[in-house]
């Protein structure tokens, strides 16, 4: 089968499309013919072995010290069941059958940037007929992360105020919509070019971080990403305080983010370096979002009912995988980038 393979860490150019052996599902596994797969911030991090500060050694221990153990990236997939290994019920015990349309995340095994992806059957849920393969592959990464942070870590309640920093990315576009859907008042931080998108997705206020005169997220003073500390500077010079603040970019620190919180507010750092993760206690939360099939099913249902829009910037043939990685690396993509193997 054709697959996008990277046998070394590095720039997007390390990925090349080549023929590899088609995997065979063992007991408990399914092989899915990939119709659409997302190229995500996680793929970009794994390809380059580029992790938030301090996580490099841990990341390389997990992924391969000198070169990646998993050579095909991609873990958000929508497609059709090609083969089932033995008795292999899908998530929640659902019976999967060959020819069925399914979507899911393949976990650390990755492998979705290929004609066929192999994973545990329990990682897949049926794809509703009214949801396209692109919508299904696109919603999983950002949607799962947004649900995890807003609902599970932040316990978002109707009527609360939520600030989403990085509202136009994969996580941000889902976070804005899910927060609004759950009854929150949403303020979005994005560049001016994406302000209209954030409003359409449900933000009632937009802060243009790129506008001249907008104070920075953090006072900076030479710290990378402006992670200065010991200053009373309020990010973006905001007067309002929020019940939940979700940073999907990595521009807030526990100290600067706390200045934006109401008395009982919670700071959610989807991107945090090791030091910040260690300081994420009490009302500051960080860490990896789990991949839960019950959440996949919930997200797909919201898309099916027209309640959640999957923002897609571009769709590429597998042969354009390097260009797709380059765009993800830019940190400026809007919503999702997909490939069709
Ligand atoms: N903890 C977890 O489990 C978890 C899960 C998923 C993702 N993540 C991490 O979360 C991050 C975001 O992921 P993603 O997929 O949403 O990324 P993404 O789609 O690549 O985000 C791109 C967006 O970020 C915005 N952006 C860039 N700089 C900004 C700034 N200074 N202020 C506000 N917005 C800015 C850009 O909008 P503008 O051009 O308009 O500024 C762009 O639309 C990644 O680092 C990823 O590794 C963590």
Image (tube, rainbow, N blue to C red):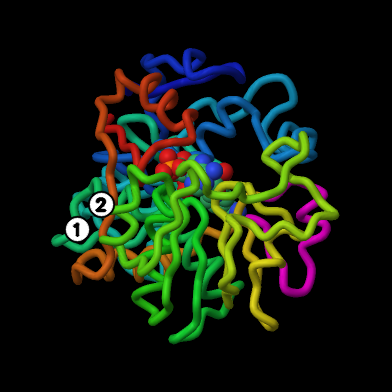
In the image, what residue occupies the spot 28% across and 39% down?
A: 313
Percent across and percent down for residue 290 are 56, 60
Q: Residue furthest front?
A: 213
Percent across and percent down for residue 192 are 37, 45
Residue 121 sits in quarter:
bottom left
* Residue 276 shown in magenta: yes
**Residue identifier under label 1:** 131
| Horizontal arrangement in the rendering, residue 266 relative to residue 140 (left or right) | right
Ligand 1 has an atom within 8 Å of the beta carbon of the residue at disc 1:
no
Q: Which residues are magenta?
A: 272-288
Q: Residues within 10 Å of mark 2 (few under 14, many from 20)?
A: many
Residue 19 sits in quarter:
top left
Q: Is residue 88 above or below residue 119?
A: below
Query: Judging from the image, what secondary structure is the residue with disc 2 in?
Result: helix
**Quarter of the image that includes the C terminus:** top left
Q: CA distance from mark 2 to mark 1?
A: 6 Å
Percent across and percent down for residue 165 are 52, 55
Q: Nearer the viewer, residue 289 or 308?
A: 308
Residue 29 in view here: no
**Residue identifier under label 2:** 135
Q: Residues within 10 Å of mark 1 (few under 14, many from 20)?
A: some
In the image, what residue occupies the spot 54% across and 17% down?
A: 11
Residue 242 in view here: yes
Percent across and percent down for residue 152 are 56, 74
* Residue 328 shown in magenta: no
| Horizontal arrangement in the rendering, residue 262 relative to residue 212 (left or right) | right
Disc assigned to residue 181: none
In the image, what residue occupies the spot 72% across and 20% down?
A: 66
**Quarter of the image that includes the N terminus:** top left
Q: Is residue 100 above or below residue 33?
A: below
Do the residues bearing badges 2 and 1 touch, measured as CB atoms within 8 Å? yes
């Amino acid at each position: 089968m054709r697959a996008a393979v990277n046998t070394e860490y590095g720039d997007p150019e390390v990925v090349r499309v080549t023929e590899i052996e088609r995997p065979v599902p063992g007991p408990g596994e399914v092989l899915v013919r990939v119709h659409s797969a997302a190229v995500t911030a996680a793929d970009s991090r794994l390809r380059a072995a580029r992790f938030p500060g301090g996580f490099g050694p841990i990341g390389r221990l997990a992924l391969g010290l000198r070169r990646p153990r998993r050579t095909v990236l991609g873990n958000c997939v929508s497609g059709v069941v090609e083969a089932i290994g033995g008795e292999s019920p899908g998530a929640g015990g659902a019976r999967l059958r060959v020819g069925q349309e399914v979507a899911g995340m393949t976990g650390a095994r990755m492998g979705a940037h290929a004609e066929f992806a192999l994973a545990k059957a329990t990682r897949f849920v049926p794809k509703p007929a009214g949801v396209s393969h692109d919508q299904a592959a696109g919603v999983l990464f950002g949607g799962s992360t947004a649900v995890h942070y807003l609902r599970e870590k932040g316990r978002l309640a109707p009527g609360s105020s939520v600030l989403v920093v990085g509202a136009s990315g994969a996580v941000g576009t889902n976070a804005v919509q899910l927060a609004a859907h759950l009854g929150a008042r949403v303020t979005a931080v994005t560049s001016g070019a994406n302000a209209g998108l954030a409003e359409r997705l449900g933000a009632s206020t937009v802060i243009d971080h790129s506008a001249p005169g907008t104070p920075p997220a953090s006072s900076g003073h030479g710290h990378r990403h402006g992670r200065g500390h010991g200053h009373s500077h309020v990010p973006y010079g905001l007067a309002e305080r929020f019940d939940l603040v979700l940073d999907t970019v990595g521009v807030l620190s526990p100290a600067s983010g706390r200045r934006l919180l109401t008395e009982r507010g919670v700071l959610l750092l989807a991107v945090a370096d090791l030091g910040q993760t260690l300081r994420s206690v009490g009302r500051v939360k960080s860490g990896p979002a789990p991949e839960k099939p019950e959440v996949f099913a919930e997200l797909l249902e919201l898309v099916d009912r027209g309640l959640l829009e999957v923002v897609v910037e571009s769709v590429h043939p597998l042969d354009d995988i390097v260009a797709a990685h380059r765009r993800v690396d830019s940190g400026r993509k809007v919503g999702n980038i997909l490939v069709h193997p």
